Amino acid sequence: MSYVTEEFVAMASINSPPTQEGEFAGYLVERLTQLGCSVVTDGSAAATGSDVGNLIARFPGRGRGIEAPVLLLSAHMDTVAPTEGMVPQIKDGRFVSNGETVLGADDKAGIALILAVLERLQKDETLPCPSLEIVLTVQEEVGLTGCRALTEPLKAAYGYVLDCDGDVGTLVNQAPTHTIIELVVQGRAAHAGIEPEKGVSAIVAAAEAIAQTRSGRIDLETTSNFGMIHGGAALNVVAERVDVAVEVRSLNPERMEEEAGHIIEVFSRVCEAKGAKLSVSQAVQYQAFHLDDNHPLVCLARGAAEAAGLDFVVEATGGGSDANIYNERGVPCAVLGIGMKEAHTVMESVAVEQLENGVGFLTEIVLGAARINP
């Protein structure tokens, strides 16, 4: 097997669910140090509850890349469950699990590509490169928690997050704003068989409100989803309280606010008509970003894809990633496809060819970044 495939097998075999990334981080600290990086662990663990902080590794620039802006490469250490006891296997040219766990290519394939490029740079000292800042985060899968809690100051001027499905050569230049709305409908309890007319059913009020709102695909930019609903105490009691959680995402922040406002307005109107009380809390999880087709990040990746002989695809996504947080912090970032398929399921896979292509693509990005004048 090649270096990148060996690394992927080794990493995918280490269990690292959110909050339990410590063992995997220990492996990565050793490997990154061997590959010529200085490595620190930030102080985010106290805030996130993980057993380790985010890892920040730095690889020195050389050749004409010494004067180039610092380039950020980022991926996340955690995976969705279950991965415990997972041993990757190759089937028809693809890495798969045994069907009982996820594979963990999301996002260990991304980390494997970063390590493979570092290995190539270490082996061939004639290759120029800018200074590299490598950030490997915890708890990405549960709300971008690790990146949000990052305490280490970043030196990078721009970067790429390796955390997207789609073939290598895919670049995500646009991602949505995401908000969560929590609605508490307070009715009035009563005996359902003896005096139901004295009660106000929170379940009925919430159901009518949900039925009057839009959900799913709202337009080309916007989605909403009623993901959780809890309420009621017993079959013979008119439900006194219901808790509803809904998310709204949009590539257009104004559309996100409009849709969130629509949901709140409908719930308020229905609850008032039913004699129920409503309380609402809303929190934006991350902000949208959009890099145009002529942005330096897009142009650099386009040139790298051409040099590597790959098709280049630019697309928007409805999902979030650590790139949303980096862009909020003023570090422009795009997301790169790493070839994974059916992530978050036991059918997750990544082709060996995609990993090999990814090493070539990312190497060309680094070489191209070394030619950029500050």
Image: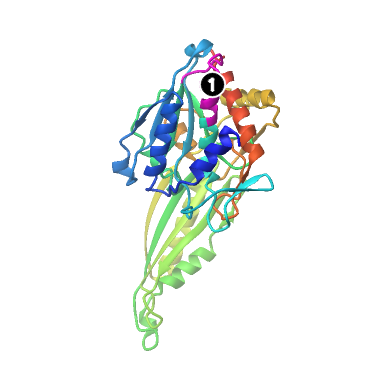
Res 320 seen here: no
Residue farthest along the left direction in this orientation: 46
Nearer the observer, 339 or 172: 339
Q: Position of residue 31 (x, y in %)?
A: 44, 32
Question: Is 28 rendered above or below residue 51?
Answer: above
Q: How many marks?
A: 1
On screen, residue 299 versus residue 211, left or right, reads: right
Q: Position of residue 248 (x, y in %)?
A: 50, 50
Q: Amino acid at mark 1?
A: Lys
Nearer the observer, 299 or 220: 299
Question: Is 186 rendered above or below residue 254?
Answer: below
Residue range (magenta): 116-131
What residue is shown with label 1?
Answer: 123
Question: Is 300 rendered above or below residue 267?
Answer: above
Which quadrant of the structure image shows residue 366?
top right
Determine crowd level at label 1: few under 14, some 14-19, many 20+ residues with C-alpha closer than 10 A: few
Which quadrant of the structure image shows residue 171?
top right
On screen, residue 298 versus residue 181, left or right, reads: right
Q: Residue at x 51, y 51 (%)?
A: 259
Res 12 seen here: yes
On screen, residue 282 versus residue 224, left or right, reads: left
Nearer the observer, 50 or 213: 50
Q: Position of residue 296 (x, y in %)?
A: 57, 22
Q: Residue at x 58, y 28 (%)?
A: 362
